[in-house]
Amino acid sequence: MRAMILAAGRGERMRPLTDHTPKPLLQAGGKPLIVWHIERLVRAGITDLVINHAHLGLQIEQALGDGSKFGARIRYSDEGTALETAGGIAFALHLLGDQPFAVVNGDIWCDYDFARMPALAAQMQRSQDTVHLVLVDNPEHHPNGDFLLHDNRVISSAPTPRHSALTFSGIGLYRPELFAQIARGTRAPLAPLLREQIAAGKASGEHHRGLWIDVGTPQRLDELDKRLRAPQNARHV
């Protein structure tokens, strides 16, 4: 299967770090954020990768090359101007094939096991599902979460009053036809598409209880760097 790493964002909250370096190339634990994803995907056997970019995108291509040094094949989708998540995926659709593909945000750090994805993609092919979302516990900066999860289904309303939303990790699995109606080069957010599929009962999901960090600010980047460098966390490196 194929995977796409989203790397086109400007990273405004990370300024001034992103004034001269694209956000996915910022380092934590001794390597760029995006390299952690590439290495984890390759270890899971997912080696056919697509990376989109816009802001300082040439730096990403120069740093990663064709992917061979990681054991991967990397192709790039140069948006010029960032098209938001769904627009960026639609722009790269010709590189992603006609089977379900994985997508991961380039500005997160997560120890999710991508080896789960091929089986989930096969399961998606046997069902009517168009979306599979990896959800995580709500971080302090996003206490209300994004989506509800019940019996491995992402749902629109809480089955019990005490059932609370979880946060979308930025890791998902999608059927390509989900993006087929977005005109290539159009800016389009992902959330409305996801909510449509959830309302239609076509979204499965899972709760990842491992380490997940939205590296959205210099402070969080610094905290992640210290965490990854700590001796007790050597297993993550």
Image (cartoon, rainbow, N blue to C red):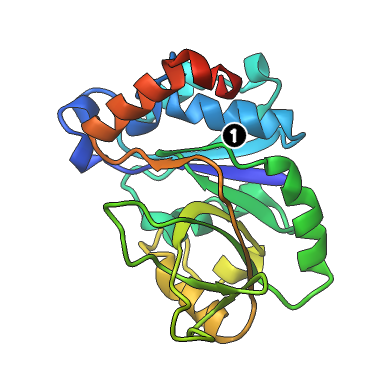
Q: Residue at the spot x=62%, y=83% of the render?
A: 201
Q: Secondary structure at mark 1?
A: strand
Tell me if residue 7 can be seen: no
**Residue 72 drawn at (x, y percent):** 68, 26
Q: Residue at the spot x=71%, y=33% of the render?
A: 47
Image vertical order of residue 164 relative to residue 224, above or below? below
In the rendered image, the quadrant that contains the C terminus is top right
Residue closest to the far left: 16
Q: Residue at the spot x=53%, y=46% of the render?
A: 104
Query: Which picture quadrant has residue 21?
Result: top left
Image vertical order of residue 233 relative to residue 12, above or below? above
Residue assigned mark 1: 75
Q: Nearer the viewer, residue 53 or 148?
A: 148
Say left or right for 121 vs 132: right
Tell me if residue 127 can be seen: yes
**Residue 135 drawn at (x, y percent):** 52, 58
Query: Which picture quadrant has residue 122?
Result: bottom right
Label 1 neighbour load within 10 Å: few <14, some 14-19, many 20+: some
Q: Amino acid at mark 1?
A: Arg
**Residue 223 drawn at (x, y percent):** 31, 28
Say left or right for 122 vs 37: right
Q: Residue at the spot x=63%, y=50% of the render?
A: 102
